[in-house]
Image: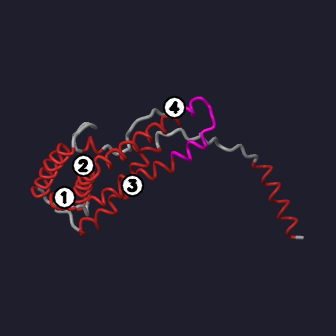
């Protein structure tokens, strides 16, 4: 049976190498250092399509980390939503192990995980790209956003698939079909239709 794990639920504290109790000043300092290093790394290499996609995603993650974690209200909402989602996954896995009906948990979880990934991955990363402080440090501009929107959608879908792979969906068994009976039935229907 799958085990609960937080893979797929983006942890912006880890992205910025911070603990969950980091202060806004620490968030800004870590962001600036990581972004400065990333911009220097980008300047030092030849940019290919693959590298550009990877760098845009990394920049977007760092920008979203600053955007979400520097303000207490936004940070608390993000962290609470993340923890609730992890707890709901755990509850679903426990219910599936005990053999209980998990349909309502599955529906609730599915809508919440989609909302979480949409809000805190794709939307937050795009919104961070329009934030004044993020733009100043990362030099993010509308051209970055145009290229990044496809990459972020792909990233969000990849996270969603990563999460789905460990969830306790019902196993589908191979159908037991009597093909001789089906042939007779179809032949009978066709014979009646010909008359």
Which residue was labeled with disc 2? 70
User: Seen from this angle, which residue lies furthest right?
Assistant: 195
At x 56%, y 47%, the residue is 107
Could you classify mark 3 by the number of other residues whose Cα lies within 10 Å: few (under 14), some (14-19), or many (20 or more)?
some
Quadrant hosting residue 149: bottom left
Q: Is mark 1 on a helix, strand or loop?
A: helix
Residue 133 marker: 1
Secondary structure state at the residue bearing disc 3 = helix
Provide the major secondary structure of the magenta segment: helix
What distance separates the C-alpha of mark 3 from that of mark 1?
Answer: 20 Å
- Calculate the distance from the C-alpha at mark 4 to the C-alpha at mark 3: 29 Å
| Circles 4, 1 touching at the beta carbon (< 8 Å) | no
Q: Distance between the residues labelled 4 and 2?
A: 38 Å
Mark nearer the N terminus (4 vs 2):
4
Task: Please identify, in this view, whether the residue under mark 4 or under mark 2 is nearer the observer.
Answer: 2
Q: Position of residue 109 (x, y in %)?
A: 51, 45
Coordinates of residue 34 in the picture (x, y in percent): 16, 48
- Find out whether residue 134 is within the magenta segment: no
Question: Relative to the observer, which residue lies in front, 97 or 173?
Answer: 97
Question: What crowding class fits label 1: few (fewer than 14 Cα within 10 Å), some (14-19), or many (20 or more)?
Answer: some
Q: Residue 64 carries which label?
A: none
Q: Would residue 112 be found to the left or right of residue 137 on screen?
A: right
């Amino acid at each position: 049976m799958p085990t609960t794990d937080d893979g797929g639920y983006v942890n912006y504290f880890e992205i910025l190498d911070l603990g969950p109790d980091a202060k806004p000043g620490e968030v800004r300092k870590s962001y600036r250092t990581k972004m400065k290093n990333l911009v220097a790394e980008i300047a030092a290499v030849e940019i290919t399509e693959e590298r550009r996609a990877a760098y845009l995603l990394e920049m977007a993650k760092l920008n979203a980390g600053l955007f979400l974690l520097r303000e207490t209200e936004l940070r608390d909402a993000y962290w609470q939503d993340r923890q609730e989602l992890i707890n709901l996954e755990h509850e679903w896995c426990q219910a599936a192990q005990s053999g209980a009906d998990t349909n309502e948990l599955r529906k609730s979880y599915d809508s919440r995980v989609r909302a979480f990934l949409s809000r805190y991955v794709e939307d937050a990363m795009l919104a961070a790209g329009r934030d004044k402080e993020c733009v100043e440090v990362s030099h993010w501009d509308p051209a970055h956003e145009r290229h990044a929107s496809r990459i972020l959608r792909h990233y969000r879908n990849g996270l969603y698939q990563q999460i789905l792979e460990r969830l306790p969906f019902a196993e589908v068994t191979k159908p037991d079909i009597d093909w001789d009976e089906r042939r007779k039935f179809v032949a009978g229907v066709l014979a009646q239709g010909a008359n």
